[in-house]
Each structure stands twice: as structure tokens, then as C-alpha cells.
Amino acid sequence: MTGRERPRGGEGRAQGALALALLLWALSFPATHVALSAYAPQHLALARYILATLALLGYCVVVRAPLPRRADLPRLVLTGLLCGTGYQLGFNFGMRTVSSGPAAVLVDTVPIFAALFGFLFLRERLGAWALGGIALGFAGTVLIASGEAGAAGFAFEPGAGYLLLAALAFSLGAVVQKPLLARLPAIPVTAYYFLAATLGLCGFSTGLPASIAAAPAAANWALLFLALFPAALAFAFWSYALARLPVAQVSSALYLVPVLTFPIAWIWLGEVPSALSFGGGTLALAGVLLVQFKGAA
């Protein structure tokens, strides 16, 4: 067996953990719509990260996770501001107007941005398949934005722009975060950058207690679910799977999230995307898959 940290045993449990992480992330899209019915996007982001950070830091205390070095702090802070603060604000503002399934596809464009950053900043080669995938992904996102606008012609839905900015922030944050994972376990890294993200969101704390008190029970339950499950628990499942399965297998499984989100949102919220949005989602996913699996061809 090649690879330095993947044990042979427990593959079935690892696959189960991965499946649960994907399901929780798919559920986060309709749950966010429920929470946003009562919370402003910035309040939802802050409340979610406070709860998730407390849960993750509590885990780190229990397992006596290693602390970061002082030299790690700038990278952790920048990761938190990108993967946490920037991503969550873009995600929540975008989810106000974009339905769950198309939103999941837009967020899943992260590999396209990562390929572009690799080309621009790391001098990684982009093959013909990758270029075709980027073009397909771009065409798909334009169709989604137009379909979600609900207007004749190609009117652009601004919420789609927010979601693409969220994917962009997450892509940059992943590049910044990667060296940390070579030295620290994934869950402590997540906990520490969640803390930085929470501090970055604290500027939006004005009015949050009143929002929590005024929110209906359904919105508060959705907030609690988003914090503890798609945020804290799903990352724990993801880390468990990543330690026991090949990286390519775990990463490629992310493309199932939009596939799961479409039926979940249909059953839970009655969201039926327009034909334009559905077609755009198919194109965007095809583009992402080409970039991921044929990028070097």
C-alpha cells in the first residue's frame, strides 16, 4: 500500500462516514433557506459559526489536540477569513434568492477555480479537457443565473454571483490551508480556522440576540442543525474518511452533493428548479468533472 496514513481496516466505516458527510452537506442547502426566513445572512453566519466553533473546540479539548505554532497563526487567520467569513457570507447572501439544487451546483465549482489558480499562480498545466471543462462550467453557471432570475432572456440573478464568490473564497482558502494539514490533524485545523472566522464575523453581532429571540422555532432548529451537523459533525466524518480512503475517492464523492440536494429540496421545500437552471446545473457539473478527472490530458 502506498500513502503514509491510510490504514487498510475500517474501509466500510469510512465509506459510511463519507456518505453521512455528503448527506449532511446536501441537507444544509434547504436548511439554510429555512433559517434565512428569520435571520439576516450575516446574523445566520455568525450564530452558526459560534455554535460550530464551540463544538469543535470542545472536541479538541477532550482529545488534547495539538495547538498551532505561532508561525501557523497568519495562515489560520487567512484560511478562516476566506473559508469561513467570506465563504459563509457569500453563501448566505446567495441562498436568499437561489434555490437549493442550483446553489449546490454553483458552490461545487470550487475545482474549476482551483484549476485556474493552479494555472495562474503555480504554473500548473491546463490540458484541452480542462479548458473545455472550464468553458462548460462557465456556460452552466450563466444558465443557472439566468434560470434563477425567472425572467425572459438572460437576466442575471445576483444571488448566483454571491455563491460564485463564496466558491472563489473557499478555493483560495483551500490553497492557503493545505500546508497546515501536513502538520496538524484536520479537525483541529478546522476548529482553529473556525475560531478565526467567528472573530471575523463578530462585526455583525449587533442585533443578533434580538434576532434569536424573535426567530420562530423552525428557524432556530435549522440554525442549530446547520451549526452542529453540516458544519461541525460533517467535517469530523470527512476527516475520518480522508484518513482511511484514497484522497481521489473522497474528493470525487463531493460531486454527489448537488445530486442529493435537488431531490431533498424538492421533497422538503417543494423547490422545483426551472428547466434552464436544471440544464445549467448539468453543464456545470459536467465541466467540474472534466476539470477534475481530465484536467491534465
Image (cartoon, rainbow, N blue to C red):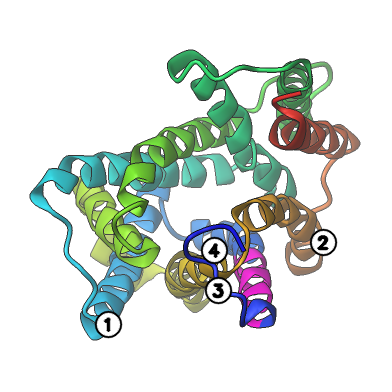
Q: Which residue is mark 2?
A: 263
- Is 19 part of what is drawn in magenta? yes
Q: Are marks 4 and 2 in contact (CB under 8 Å)?
A: no
Mark 1 belongs to which amino acid? Answer: Val
Q: Which residues are magenta?
A: 13-24
Disc with the residue nearer the chain's start (4 vs 2):
4
Residue 45, visible in the rendered structure: yes
Q: How many marks?
A: 4
Q: Position of residue 57 (x, y in %)?
A: 25, 72
Residue drawn at (42%, 47%), measured in percent from left and top?
A: 88
Q: In the shown orientation, is residue 180 left or right of residue 229?
A: left
Mark in front: 3 vs 1: 3
Q: Is residue 242 above or below residue 146?
A: below
Residue drawn at (47%, 74%), measured in percent from left and top?
A: 233
Mark 4 belongs to which amino acid? Answer: Leu
Calculate the distance from the C-alpha at mark 4 to the C-alpha at mark 2.
26 Å
Calculate the distance from the C-alpha at mark 1 to the C-alpha at mark 2.
37 Å
Q: Which residue is mark 3?
A: 7
What secondary structure is marked by label 1? Answer: helix
Of 184 and 153, nearer the camera is: 184
**What is the crowding at mark 2: few (fewer than 14 residues within 10 Å), some, or many (at least 20)?**
some
The single residue placed furthest to the left in the displayed view is 70
Q: Which residue is mark 1?
A: 63
Calculate the distance from the C-alpha at mark 4 to the C-alpha at mark 3.
11 Å
Q: Are marks 1 and 2 in contact (CB under 8 Å)?
A: no
**What is the crowding at mark 4: few (fewer than 14 residues within 10 Å), some, or many (at least 20)?**
many
Q: Which residue is mark 4?
A: 242
The single residue placed furthest to the front in the displayed view is 1
